[in-house]
Image: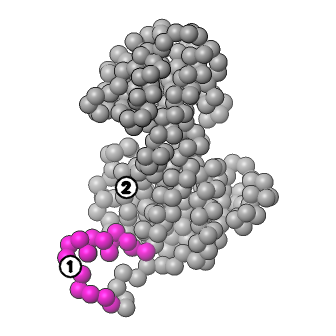
């Protein structure tokens, strides 16, 4: 493999500077026009590529990997999450998988705070009223939201992004609580005054706002299920900038419609872009099209990570961001 010029197939368009650098280093096939590949397209691409560069919308399962050509040796995912790739099956077939961790932390945390503000301060309602031209003028009781200072924020998943959300929320005067697989070191907790809850059930019953920041794995699927959502205070708000599958979306919709949950800010959804239509109709819900990491700086840094992983692999070394089944 060292010294060879690899054939790299990219499934979606990337920033110009990233594509230009790929052209310099590899025999690269870019996606033009920028449309999502079908299942058949992906299988064909895996048949002719040494390296496939997919995105989170490209589901790659065991059956597809079984049809991959013998050339495919690396799936260099453009994104941190790899729940759309059967990593275990890839490893069994000698195909490495890499991702792009750590580059979307600050951008995603920014979006989590933006959603918290948008829901609690009813910003979209005000925006809609102004854009429609129906604003009758200021009134003391119009658009009353809630103050963030003093509210209890429960962070579900206290990894890099969760900690970045905690730092931002702490600056707003919020009380920081969290549930995580492992408790953080005391000095990290002390930085934001975070309180650890070993029991997720006990935490959610006491929080004013829940921020979902854990990855989607078999153990986190519907972690916020119908039973746990029933434990929330009726004044509570849920924000999710991680993975939609962590929340039972139908149960969440029912709770919001029944007034059992005060509001939600969602940047991700359980079934991709197929969103529960009843969820769209609710005035106490803010929906975004998976914009959490959508900054130009972040997208370029993701591309640089992909290139580094491919280049390191091409030089005969282990990609620095290789993902192993044991890590999931």
- The residue at which mark 1 appears reads as 134
Mark linked to residue 288 = 2
Q: For mark 2, does the 10 Å Cα neighbourhood hold few (<14), some (14 to 19), or many (20 or more) residues?
A: some
In the image, residue 227 above or below residue 310: below
Count of number-bearing discs: 2
Taking the image as shown, residue 72 lies to the left or right of residue 139, namely right
The answer to whether residue 66 is visible is no
What coloring was used for the rendering?
Answer: one colour
Question: Could you tell which of marks 1 and 2 lies nearer the N-terminus?
Answer: 1
Q: For mark 1, does the 10 Å Cα neighbourhood hold few (<14), some (14 to 19), or many (20 or more) residues?
A: few
Q: Residue at x 58, y 77 (%)?
A: 149
Q: Residue at x 28, y 63 (%)?
A: 281
What's the magenta region?
121-139
> Does the magenta segment cover residue 306?
no
Q: In this view of the protein, which residue sits in the foreground, 270 or 42? A: 42
- SS type, badge 2: loop
In the image, residue 65 above or below residue 1: below
Q: In this view of the protein, which residue sits in the foreground, 7 or 26? A: 26
Q: Percent from the top left, x then y, of residue 240?
A: 48, 55
């Amino acid at each position: 493999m060292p010294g060879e010029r690899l054939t790299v197939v990219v499934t979606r368009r990337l920033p110009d500077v990233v594509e230009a650098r790929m052209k310099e280093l590899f025999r690269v096939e870019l996606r033009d026009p920028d449309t999502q590949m079908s299942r058949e397209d992906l299988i064909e691409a895996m048949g002719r590529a040494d390296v496939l560069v997919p995105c989170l919308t490209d589901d790659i399962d065991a059956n597809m990997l079984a049809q991959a050509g013998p050339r495919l040796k690396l799936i260099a995912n453009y994104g941190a999450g790899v729940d759309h790739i059967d990593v275990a099956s890839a490893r069994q077939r000698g195909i490495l998988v890499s991702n792009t961790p750590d580059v979307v932390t600050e951008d995603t945390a920014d979006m989590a705070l933006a959603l918290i503000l948008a829901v609690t301060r009813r910003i979209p309602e005000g925006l809609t009223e102004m854009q429609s031209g129906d604003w009758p003028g200021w009134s003391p009781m119009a658009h009353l939201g809630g103050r963030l200072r003093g509210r209890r924020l429960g962070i579900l998943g206290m990894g890099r992004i969760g900690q970045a959300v905690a730092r931002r929320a702490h600056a707003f005067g919020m009380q920081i609580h969290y549930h995580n697989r492992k408790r953080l070191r005391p000095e990290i907790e002390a930085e934001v005054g975070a309180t650890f809850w070993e029991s997720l059930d006990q935490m959610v019953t006491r929080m004013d706002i829940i921020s979902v920041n854990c990855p989607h794995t078999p153990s986190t699927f519907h972690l916020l299920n119908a039973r746990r959502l029933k434990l929330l205070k009726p004044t509570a708000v849920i924000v999710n900038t991680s993975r939609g599958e962590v929340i039972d979306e139908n149960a969440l919709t029912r709770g919001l419609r029944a007034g059992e949950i005060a509001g939600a800010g969602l940047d991700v959804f359980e079934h991709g872009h197929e969103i529960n239509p009843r969820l769209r109709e609710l005035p106490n819900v803010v929906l975004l099209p998976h914009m959490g990491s959508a900054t130009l700086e972040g997208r370029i840094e993701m591309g640089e990570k992909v290139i580094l992983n491919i280049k390191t692999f091409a030089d005969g070394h282990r990609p620095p961001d290789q993902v192993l089944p044991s890590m999931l």
